[in-house]
Amino acid sequence: MTHPRLVNAKKCLASHCPGPGYKVGIPASLNYVYLNETQDAPLHPYPNWREGCLAHNGSVVSNRTVVSTFRVNVDKCDRLWVVDNGVSDMSTDVKQVTQPSVLVFNLRTDELLKKFILNETVLRDSSVLTSIAVEIVGKDCARAKSYAYITDMGSNAIIVYSMHDDDAWRVENHYFHFDPHAGIYKVGGIDFYWSDGVSSGALSQPKKDGFCDLYLHPTSSTKQFRMSTRLLRDKNVPKEDIFNGVEIIGDKGPKSQATSCDIDLSTNVLFYTQVCKNGLGCWNLDKKFSEVNTPLILSDCNLMEFPNDVKADREGNLWILSDRQSRFLYEAMDFDQVNFRVLTAPTSTLIQGTACEKKSFFSRISDTMVKVR
């Protein structure tokens, strides 16, 4: 397929800012690019160069500094939600620079609206916070209640943060753990083993009861799960309800491990990365979960080597980040090549002609008439 926009993040590696996150040498954990049609766009630390990077002594510059984040979320109220692990040099010499936290920014002004510190009541020594999904309850942003669902990939849990109550709690379930049979990977010619638990979640439209479904999966698993946010919003929900409330939807098949997923609400399609296939899969929530209805719709061993994140925006576009992470962690990157890419395309274009497309009654009649002819 032809990608309408392709952003090359190679230039960001020339920065001189100290390196948070995975390894020393990474300028900033949270960045943005200007969509000015160029395919060679430098990254800009968020919220700015001074606060987006660590100080020379390795400390945070301000309470807006993000040390190490995996994935972010933008809600319908134009707020940016970030979960910060607060750790530098995660892959070798781990250093806890600051406490793990949830940060909420006003994207129109870059003002930090809220910073909530996550403490030992919800974290474990092995905690690795990887993604954040946000549910807004109510139409008025000024009065609506906001809940953030944070996946803890390292200690197999979901951490719920209620902005209204300014409180957080931990939710555990055996389905949040990894599948030992799905821990073997081969990406970019590199073999490795991961025991990563639940790593990503995506929210459906609100149902008739007012709650959403959270679709989630461990990285090292080929299964897709679902649970109602009714079980997550209530801090005191009985444990047996949590135990029985997570549903197995189905299995995506061999070598279908996914790091990230998101739902495009305009098409009601769940998109998910396919790490071992260097690609992207999808499933229309209105259809039965099966092998036929969960096709691989994109695959490119160059452009999409290690697709690490996927996001659907409110304008019907899908954004994919590929970063050759297996080479970054276990081998070496060739910086004469493009290693980091952001790709985007309309969701309707991506699913056109696939099992994820939901055709209208008239389209189905037309297809039938063509086949008869």
Image (tube, rainbow, N blue to C red):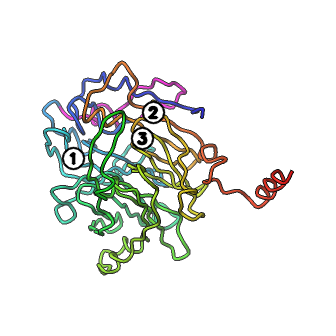
The mark nearer the N terminus, 2 or 3, is: 2
* Disc 1 secondary structure class: loop
Judging depth in this view, the residue of 197 and 10 nearest the camera is 197
Residue designated by label 2 = 301
The mark nearer the N terminus, 3 or 1, is: 1
Local crowd size for mark 2, using a 10 Å CA cut-off: few (<14), some (14–19), many (≥20): few
Judging depth in this view, the residue of 128 and 114 nearest the camera is 128
Tell me what residue is drawn at x 60 percent, y 64 percent. 286
Q: Quadrant of residue 226?
A: bottom left
Report the disc number at residue 86: 1
Which amino acid, mark 1? Answer: Gly
The mark nearer the N terminus, 2 or 1, is: 1
Which amino acid, mark 2? Answer: Cys
Give the number of marks: 3
Asked if the magenta segment contains residue 201, the reply would be no
Residue designated by label 3 = 307
